[in-house]
Amino acid sequence: MNPLPVLAGAAAAWGLAALIALLGGTSRPAVRACCAVSGLGGAAAVAGGVASLLSGDSRVVTAGGSVVVGTLQLQATSLAGVFVALLGLVAVAIAAYVPRYHEPGRATGLYLAVYNLALLASLAVLAAGNVVTFLVAWETMALLCYLLVLRRPRRAEAAAGAFWFLALSEVGFVLIIAAFVILAAKTHTMQLDLIAARARLVTGGWRDTAFLLALAGFGFKAGLVPLHVWLPEAHPVAPADGSAFLSGLVVKLGVYGIALFGFGLLPAGPAWRGVLTMAAGAVTAAIGILYALGERDIKRFLAFSTIENIGIIVTAFGAAMTFWAYGQRLLWAFLLLAGLYHVANHGTYKTLLFLEAGVIEHATGTRDMDRLGGLAHRMPRASVITFVGTLGIAALPPFNGFVSEWLIFQGLFQGFRTGSHLVAILIVLAAATLGLTGGLAIYAFVRGYGIPFLGMPRTRPAAEATEARQPVAGPALLAVACAALAVGAPVVLAVLARAMRTVTGVALRPELLPGNLTVIPAHTKFSGFSPTWLAVFLLAITALPALIYLAGRPRAASRIEPVWDGGIVAFKPRMQYSAMTFSAPTRVTFDALYRPSVSVRRASDDPAGRSGPVHYESQATPVFQRYLYRPVIRAFEWLADVVRPIQSGDVNLYLFYVFAAVLVAYLIAAV
Amino acid sequence: MTDQRAASRSVPETAAELRRAVTRQFGRSLHIRTLDTGSCAACEQEIRLLAAPHYDLHRLGFFFTPAPRHADLLMVTGPMVRAFDIAARKTYEAMPGPKLVVATGACALGGVYQPDAFTHGGVGETLPVDVWIPGCPPSPLALLQGLLVAVGRLAEKVQDLSFIQNGTPR
Amino acid sequence: MTLWFLRGLRRGVVTTRYPARPDASAAALPTPPAFRPEALTRALADRLAAACPSRALARDGDALVFDVGACTACGRCLAEAPGAATSSGEFELAATLPAHLVKRIPLLAGGGAAAPATEGGSP
């Protein structure tokens, strides 16, 4: 099946949805209609994405163009297939979510129009057939996302968050343009598939420079450390579905860009670029989860968790590139597959978690974990759905996060096959770092789920939360998708293996799925496990004792007693862990990273503290902003000051500039 | 009437049978949870010595446990201050049956403190006590004897003692 | 490690054999008093009851009521009436019923009202 018409249909649907929202967004039926059309577009995108995975790269279609933007060309590639399918799934889920989340109004109408156009632009990025299309679509997508984040421009923090997003996006864009310009100039074509075919024309130094520029440029969007600072600023201020779209998809576009350069356009390369990518990914993962543990705001917490997962994906890609450099083509294709599987998984459960964060925010009025608690009783549906997402992101077997992380780990463990001791050690170090982040992720999500949902409500809004009239269909759909990605892992892997054959030319299927629902990491004698049988087994060993108990339990009278609490009079909410105390051990251990600044203020000097309230404040130093960004910003401000005299405002001086420019142009033309 | 007799068929009908049932249940392994209802901690010191090598209650199959859920026997010291009522009740009810209660020390047995606004003066009216161990504090040997009486491995001695001394004073 | 082991073997086991065999330290324990009824006059019984800080002693007509459970073995009654009260040496005092701990000690038959400090006297 040719995916391009299906994707064109999706694009048309989203364009139509944007129009509906623009024209009629103030009324509830119009919002519903817009979402319905948007959801249909999403379904079409899912179909188109899966089709491109299976059927290989489509042909390049010229979609017109103009003198201003050049020729627009589209191509549905296998590499983009996972991302397109994810885009569609996210669009469907958000479409089901929006009607109950946003109040109809002029702001909502504009917002939905911008959102649907952003979906369209993202699809265009993924389906771009040449450099110009890619760049135009990319910048459009970035500007539209800026408007998404800036939904309520009059709030100061919204403006700051959106500004960080835009500023870093633009810096990354400059680097991406530079990378593409190098490729286009060296291969004398703008078409992406032709660039890939002529990749050997891009010689050593240029090739590596182009890759590094792309890694940095797309790294800004993906959220690689230290280019990630916009993520925790932008996510909390965007509305929940905006944050879900950002984390679920937009950062994946950065990942797509890295994969495009690393596997599509410039597959050949030295080992050090793979090691560098892998190291960047591992550091990103560790730092991401460490900062996540210091956050009380649910959305900032989830934003840092996104950074962690992006790190995992980029580590897999880096290791894949390293394996290619040593001739291990099976592992090269395998780790690319594992990374793409993690893209799909993370997109699914992160979107789910952000949508549920929005539900919590609407039900309780706060995003602060330390003001919540006991929501599992008040909001049972939301708590079950969030739990499914939490199990996925914590990578607990047999859920989908576990499957993709297992695959990545098994690929990294085979680092010894590279034959180079140094590289093997570096790969092992990356695996160890990912192991650390895996453990910290479980810790972080026990905190992230337990503090708001379990225990007793810490404040009145939490005690009175209700999930009536809260959206549930969208997140529920994503929870089902998480389960499907887990239980249906063999199917997913078969589809991805088919796509890998197109992208890498390696037939992975026999070395991945030897049959009987088992998965092996590219080499038979190394290891193997079956996600499906694991799920069945886990279900059985939990169900079997339960059945034995139910069948054979003594019929004598049993007493139901309250939980043993040490004999206290009553539980009080303040006796519970708070989010910050739960993660205190990590912050103490890693205080070299957090560099907390502590301030304690007392009302008087009474050492016994009887004088009155004591004010305690601890804040992690924003190391990246302080030591990296602020100096760079100050340098640019200094440079601007130095250059300012050129713009003196004197008309005579400007006329002199014109004269000088014309003179220089004549001289050059004459010579 | 028939129902009651039918129901009572599972209940031991004589004291001796009850004693045998208790010994069968607890005789070889007993988990003890101590409860301090406001004592001066001298009883606690003696109880603590039970676990030391000289007295070693483990050789008799007795163990201390902090969790009432795991306990068979509640060893109570102190005069049961009223502020502790809820905690004592909760601890007792958190123990699964069958369970025993041993009141330890003169305070718990009604001596030393008179009942007033702050204390019950003894644990008898708050908890159903099975064995009373006098002493201030009772020595570890007295505690061991009390525990062994509680599980039926030793016969009770005090009801035959008269505390009357005949003949010349020692 | 070996030295500790050998030393332990040489010194023997320190755990008491109680209840299989009597414990040597039992003789040094403070224990509740035992009374000589032939030395207990009514006046003496009243004085003993007043002296007991734990209210373990009381006079009920012609008997001294002794609550063994309330006794703290403080020794004040021994000091008050050395001829009438001595340490009983009994420490195995666990009781299954409170009544088992309440002992009635008959007073001197026909003992006069206020016979002053003639303890240790002949019957």
Image: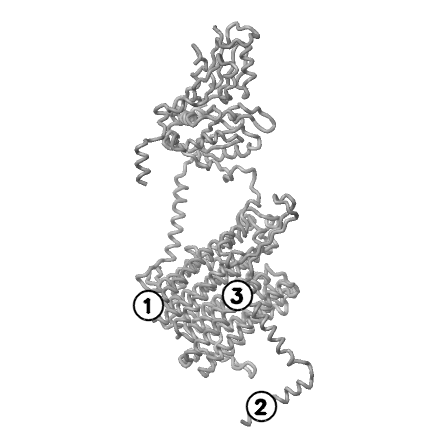
Residue tagged by mark 1?
A: A419
Q: Kindly indicate whether the residues beneath marks 2 and 1 are on one polypeptide chain.
A: yes
Residue B11 appears in the figure: no
Residue C94: x %, y % from top left = 44, 23
Q: Are marks 1 and 3 in contact (CB under 8 Å)?
A: no
Q: Which mark is residue A665?
A: 2
User: Looking at this view, is A534 or A11 the one in front?
Assistant: A534
Real-space Cα separation, disc 2 to disc 1, in angstroms: 57 Å
User: Looking at this view, is A198 or A664 the one in front?
Assistant: A664
Foreground label between 1 and 3: 1
Residue A394 appears in the figure: yes
Q: Callout 2 environment at 10 Å: few (<14), some (14 to 19), or many (20+)?
A: few
Q: Is residue A285 left or right of residue C6?
A: right
Residue A638 versus residue A491 in the image, above or below: below
**Location of residue B120 by image quarter:** top right
Identified at 61% across, 28% down, the residue is B117
User: Looking at this view, is B3 or A131 the one in front?
Assistant: A131
First in sequence: mark 2 vs mark 3: 3
Query: What is the chain identity of the residue bearing mark 2?
Result: A
Residue B86: x %, y % from top left = 55, 34
- Hey, what amino acid is under mark 2? Ala
Foreground label between 2 and 3: 2
Residue tagged by mark 3?
A: A228
Residue A473: x %, y % from top left = 53, 58
**Location of residue A151 by image quarter:** bottom right
* Label 1 secondary element: loop
